[in-house]
Image (tube, rainbow, N blue to C red):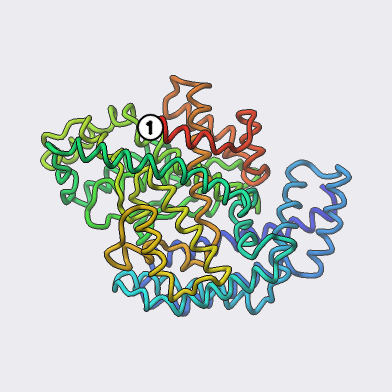
Amino acid sequence: MSKHFNELNKELEKAAVYTAILNLIDYDSQVNAPPEADRNTSQITGVIANEYHDIFTGKRFIRLLKKCKKEAKNKELTAVESALVREAAKKSAELVPIPSDEYRDFSELTARSVNIWTSAKKHDSYEEFVPQLEKIINYKKKFAAYQRRGEKNLYDVLLKAYEPEFLTEKLDVICRQVKDAVIPLVKDAVKKQKKDDKDYSWSCMDKGYDVKKLDDFCMRLGEYIGLESRKCVIGESEHPFTINVHNRDVRLTNNYRNRDIFGPIFSMLHESGHALYELGIADKLSLTILGTGTSMGMHEAQSRFFENMIGKQRSFWEVWFPRLKETFPKELSGIQLDDFMQAINRVSQGVIRIDADELTYPLHIIIRYELEKKLISGKIKAGELEKEWNRMYKDYIGSIPSDASEGVLQDIHWAMGEFGYFPSYLIGSAAAAQIYYHIQEKMPEAGINEIRNYLRENIYVYGKTLGMNRILKKMMSEEFNINYYIQYLKDKWG
């Protein structure tokens, strides 16, 4: 290890620790903290975020970084050291243009915004959230303008933070391909279901379920997928999410709204995919700036893979449906596996993204992608968002939300300042399908343990040392290809 890298790495270790602390505060704020805590806690968040910012923007850090970049270029550093330098340079370039006081103000703003969003959703009042959202959008546009270095538009700057290999030029093409394939499939599937529904009532799937029993069942599912109780904590929040402190402390949440049976089960599978990724990071990378998933697109590929490619297969429920019936013998009396499989793979023109079936799901994401582009470009303002949201839902899905809480307020991402995140769900869903076909071909008889181990060895261990396309190419000799996803949807609903 070179002297310069050793000094740089000490600063990077501090940055990784600050990230872990901020993640812990975020988890606690959404799961455990009292409602009145957010004002003072946001100041704590602001101070730590400011320290994080100062690491990457300090003159000494930039001087060390310059020397280490030269050493990496001359092959004087190991592969991991070079990757750390590359990621440090990326983070420094992202933060240097943003004034320290503005970065702190924004960190405090988003720390408070989650509680404001939660209250607005509870009161079904988008107007309550609009002033906060306007501030967040203004900051995101200002920061993107500071950081812009030849990107086609401000929104591309925001996209790079989550999935840098897919900016608007690529995403526009992908979205058009997916829309052209999916919208006709949705119409055909809904039409067919109406014929099949004449003699069957789906209300049997909508009964209230005991939350404690459902939580216990979800915990057992998580253990089966591979979550280790000694390394994971599972709480409850308004919007399910996963954070990592390091690869031996991963926190995830679930939500048991309306005592619905499907939402908690598939949220558990989804968040387990995220958690497995973080648990599988190599020890040498954990507690470094490389110690997390390579991108949100690849992260969502893992969550969507376990939610859909594992969790909605008949073979999975041949094992788990009898256990579910044992848990709810009265509620599921008379329900057969065929009925259950039809219910979980049923195409619905519903308006809730996290409850969406696989076929309509990409349309939910495309709506958000197009709305974000309009908000960042200034074509629409925050106050006009709800009206535009409802219009697009009618055009794309065929349904209009009955209120703001199941419409424009349903997602937490914008309250957290995460503009540019949503396209990762589409890229992730597509990559999950690509991985699914690859595993089918490579190991068609594999069980859950073999699949999890294969994903850990070929994706998880790398952390951020390799980008998404490099990981896919290394694993299956092919980079991202949207055609697998379109084929997957056609195979299932064509």
Asked whether, in this view, residue 213 is left or right of residue 23, the answer is left
Q: Quadrant of residue 142?
A: bottom right
Measuring 43% from the left and 67% from the top, which residue is drawn there? 29
- Where is residue 213 shown, x and y percent of the image? 22, 46
Instruction: Tally the numbered discs.
Output: 1
Q: Relative to 377, does residue 88 appear above or below in the rendering?
A: above
Q: In the shown orientation, is residue 57 left or right of residue 207?
A: right
Is residue 118 found left or right of 473 in the rendered image?
left
Q: Residues within 10 Å of mark 1 (few under 14, many from 20)?
A: some
Which element carries disc 1, helix, strand or loop? loop
Camera-nearest residue between 376 and 210: 376
Check the image and report above or below for 261 versus 116.
Answer: above
Residue, far top: 445
The image position of residue 399, as x and y in percent, is: 30, 56
The answer to which quarter of the image holds residue 312 is top left
Residue type beneath disc 1? Gly
**Percent position of residue 355, x then y:** 33, 50
Residue 301 screen position, x and y as percent = 50, 42
Which residue is drawn at the image coordinates 74% and 55% (left, top)? 9
Residue marked by disc 1: 494
Q: Residue at x 22, y 30 (%)?
A: 338
The quarter in which the C terminus is drawn is top left
Q: Quadrant of residue 8?
A: bottom right
Judging depth in this view, the residue of 103 and 19 nearest the camera is 103
